[in-house]
Image: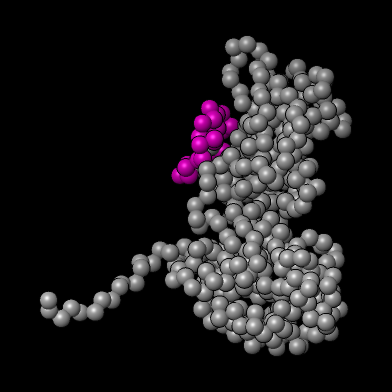
Amino acid sequence: MNSPAGRGKDSARPYFFLSYAHTPRINPRAADPNLWVAKLYQDLCEAILQITDAPAGHPIGFMDRSMHQGQKWAERLSRELSGCRVFVPLYSPRYFKSEACGKEWHLFTRRSVYQRRPGAERMTGIVPALWVSMEHYTLPRVASELQFSHDSFGADYAAEGLYALMKIASYSSQYATAVLRLAQRIVDVADQTVIPVTQPLDFESSPSAFDPPEPTDRVRISVFSYRQPELPPTRSATCYGERRTDWQPFRPPSGRPLAEDAADVARNMGFQPTVHEFEEEAENLLAADRPAGPSVLLVDRWAFLDSQRAETVRRLDRRNLGSVSILEPWNREDQQCRDNERMLNDLGDTVLTVSRGSRRKPSLRGDAVGGSPGNLDDFRGELERAVMRASTAYEQETARPEPPQHRRPSIGR
């Protein structure tokens, strides 16, 4: 068949960009659930190699295997989106809640699409794929406006999605059929359209192409820590900055604020995170009858040495709000933390008596049951569970009717 592999500048451009929502692990030691997407990606690349004359070393596709971290990641994503020939969004409910996926869609659709042949079927450069069935899910406007039929990939694919075809052995032939037809569709769209390469746009400042999130899709991340000038003389300034949200407890190897890492994890889960100093959030958390949204508090136990500020955290702990999860990240590679572990544990016990005693609220103490989750990967796994617990509790709290307003009985007129 005629392949676009040798057509000028197209020969060095990936056929497709696979856009998907990262699925969180059940626990830090569980297998990575995104390996199923990686298998699909490899199968698509192999199928495209088989049906084209793409030479060895030709970039067949692009799939982001990172955790959406840092400026270099954002620049790489922007560069790939400015040059790929086809955009393949992997539909799932989680996908359309992901801000990062919405930004990928937005950046790709900033590019112009031209038909190679007059009168050909109108193509957008977007070839959606069903990861799971979306039959009972309302698609956002940009997806619902696409003129695309999934029926040609097979009835079982359209009813179940690729994930089910991969997981259920009896569907193996249907999976192979769906992958081959999806690969053929990608090649056809690449062959019949010209989507010029553009200058990469700024990923972080780009809007999401999807509809605005519901209030339950938001999560507020607050940090209880120090600014460098506030540190006690017994604590090194290495992990601190000008703001309390600059706290970097896992330095090294991580040299970025923990709140930024937490926000990335929340985005990958489909939430819209905001980051605050705890003091900015405390008044609302302590005064409101009901919370403004699910919240996660990241606690630096060294900051409990400031007894006045620690009292505010103690008051929040006593409220025992299900929609507020409290995490105590703990780097066991930090020599000062190890040397002062007993003292810091005792401080935490006096402040967080309710959270420490409740199994529904996760904590990253160094003496945690089942081991010492004192590294960044363990933190990410705990954060995923903390966000889900806070979000579920928030939905339950807001679903309850308002308590009745008791009025004093009137005594005549």
Q: Is residue 141 magenta?
A: yes
* Residue 362 picture quarter: bottom right
Please indicate whether residue 9 sits to the left or right of residue 363 in the image. Answer: right
Is 59 left, or right, of 307 in this rendering?
right
- Where residue 29 sits, quadrant-wise, is bottom right
Question: Which image quadrant for residue 301?
Answer: bottom right
Find the residue positioned furthest to the front: 413
Residue at coordinates 56% horizontally, 38% vertically from top-left? Answer: 157
Percent position of residue 139, x then y: 50, 40
- Can you see residue 391? yes
Q: Closest to the observer: 268 or 150?
A: 268
User: Observer-nearest residue: 148 or 100?
Assistant: 100
**Label total for image:** 0
**Residue range (magenta):** 135-157
Identify whether 86 is placed above or below 284. Answer: above
Q: Is residue 151 magenta?
A: yes
Q: Position of residue 57 (x, y in %)?
A: 87, 33
- Residue for point 87% across, 30% down: 56
The quadrant in which the C terminus is found is bottom left
Residue 23 appears at what percent x and percent y? 64, 54
Rendered residue at 81%/69% (across/down): 239
Q: In this view of the protein, which residue sits in the foreground, 360 or 57?
A: 360
Nearest the camera: 143 or 312? Answer: 312
- Quarter of the picture containing the N terminus is top right
Q: Residue at x 52, y 46 (%)?
A: 212
